[in-house]
Image (cartoon, rainbow, N blue to C red):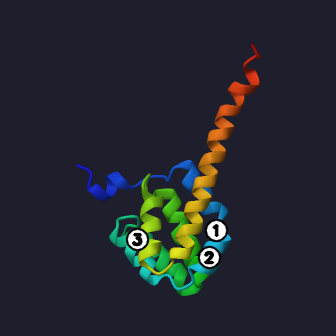
Amino acid sequence: MATADELNRGRMNEIDRYVIQSNMEDLCQELKKSDVLITNMFSRHIFNADDIDMIEKQLEKNPRQGIKEALKCLMASGGVNAFDVFIDCLNKSGFAHVAEKLQIDRKERTEAMNVEAKLPDAVTTPPS
């Protein structure tokens, strides 16, 4: 039987992945002192023990590489609710300004996707 941790893992949804990937450079800059954030994400089951091992190895080499590894793990296996948990962890870890920017970008991307989804109908429907 699968554990709760295994059930919650999986790829992040497309819009949330897009937002994280589009902000990768800023996130790497802003989250340099991220040990509390990483611990919070582990405690919320976004990362498993293997993820933490990989992230910590990268953090030892270079904080930027560690953050990049954490974000890659977040997008690849954090699960469908990972973005919301990430935002909560950012707020609790002293990165509220980062959380706010990501939420604004997510809203803008969602609105853009909704407009794009409606375009084909408007273009293909002949005027009456």
User: Residue sitting at 58 percent across and 56 percent down?
Assistant: 106
Badge 2: how crowded within 10 Å, few (<14), some, or many (20+)?
some
| Mark closer to the chain start, 1 or 3 | 1
Callout 3 touching callout 2 (CB < 8 Å): no
67 with respect to 40 (left or right): right
Identified by mark 2, the residue type is Cys
Q: Which residue is mark 3?
A: 41
Q: Would residue 126 appear left or right of 104 to someone viewing this image?
A: right
Q: Is 59 above or below relative to 124?
A: below
Q: CA distance from mark 3 to mark 2?
A: 16 Å
Residue 25 lies in quadrant: bottom right
Q: Secondary structure at mark 2?
A: helix
Q: Helix, strand or loop at disc 1?
A: helix
Residue in the foreground of this view, choosing between 92 and 67: 92
The residue sitting at 38% across, 75% down in the picture is 40
- Percent x, y for residue 94? 47, 81
Q: Which residue is mark 1?
A: 24
Q: Which residue, as the protein is rendered here, is positioned at the far front?
A: 128
> In the image, what residue type sits under mark 3?
Met
Which mark, residue 28? 2
- Circles 1 and 3: CB atoms closer than 8 Å: no
Q: Secondary structure at mark 3?
A: helix
Residue type at tag 1: Met
Up/down of 37 relative to 21, above or below = below
Q: Is residue 92 above or below residue 85?
A: below
State whether residue 99 appears in this view: yes
Vertical position of residue 103 compared to residue 123: above or below: below
Tell me, yes or no, whether the two marked residues, 1 and 2, touch with CB atoms within 8 Å. Answer: yes
